[in-house]
Image (cartoon, coloured by chain):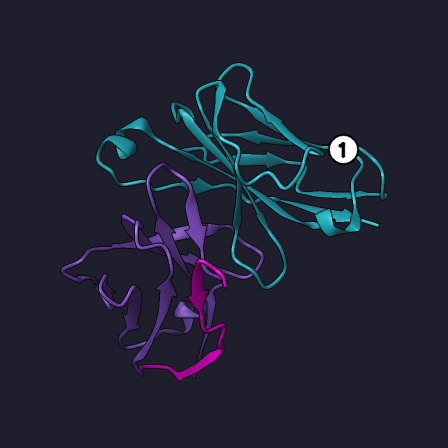
Chain colours: A cyan, B purple
Amino acid sequence: GAGVSQTPSNKVTEKGKYVELRCDPISGHTALYWYRQSLGQGPEFLIYFQGTGAADDSGLPNDRFFAVRPEGSVSTLKIQRTERGDSAVYLCASSSPRGQQKGYNEQFFGPGTRLTVL
Amino acid sequence: RKEVEQDPGPFNVPEGATVAFNCTYSNSASQSFFWYRQDCRKEPKLLMSVYSSGNEDGRFTAQLNRASQYISLLIRDSKLSDSATYLCVVKAAGNKLTFGGGTRVLVKP
């Protein structure tokens, strides 16, 4: 079946520009997560949605970062006034409500969007 | 100090040998523990959960020591296809996963 998809796969932008990264979760998954992975590091949590609402946005680094999930499915991560330090792979993951009820939180990751800020 | 710490490696392992590595975590409220595998330029994928009693999945054995706050992974009879980065992951209350920096394993013929 279809996994998590992310577009674009690569995005090159200039410092100061605005970017949007899109995530399509696995059908039926109510939870959606955004992570950021810098070179040589593990993924770092940004934000988690349960349905349409952000249940935990404690990982967003500053107010230049914003994410939405208006219909509880597709999510968009928005970055304003990009900086060179924003360059990273942005990973999206989703998980099933059945998994959460078991206390087993398998998150299925998409292939990521590689963002390069020049 | 990072919440989850791992030796970055690389661990160079002859094919067929056994390799073991661990990670330490600082949050004593951590409730769930996992090992994820990440191939070069690919997304992380769940390898196995880690239970207090220890658990095995084929050639992979995971152990959890809550008192010392470390988790281990052992790979027996290493295959070339085991070459990857292994990410130690912990979860406290809520659904946020906290990842270590990963341990790189290179299995060589």
Q: Is residue B44 above or below residue A75?
A: below
User: Badge 1 is on which residue?
Assistant: A80
> Relative to residue B102, is residue A22 drawn left or right?
right
Residue occupying the far left of the picture? B53
**Is residue B14 rendered magenta in the image?**
yes
Q: Is residue A23 left or right of residue A13?
A: left
- The span picked out in magenta is B1-16
Which quadrant of the structure image shows residue B96? Answer: top left
For residue A104, above or below residue A42: above
- Location of the N terminus of chain A by quadrant is top left
Task: Indicate the position of residue A82 as horizontal and vertical percent values.
Answer: 78, 40
| Residue sitting nearer the eye, A68 or A108 | A68
Expressed as whole percent of the image width and height from the top left, the position of residue A57 reads 53, 33
Q: Is residue B63 left or right of residue A60?
A: left
Q: Is residue B66 above or below residue A59?
A: below
SS state under label 1: loop
What is the three-letter code of the residue carrying label 1?
Gln
Q: Residue at x 21, y 35 (%)?
A: A102
Give neighbour class at mark 1: few <14, some 14-19, many 20+ (Cα, 10 Å).
Answer: some
Observer-nearest of B97 and A113: B97
Q: Does the magenta run of residues contain A96?
A: no
Residue A96 in picture, x, y percent from top left: 34, 30
Q: State the image quarter where residue A27 is shown.
A: top left
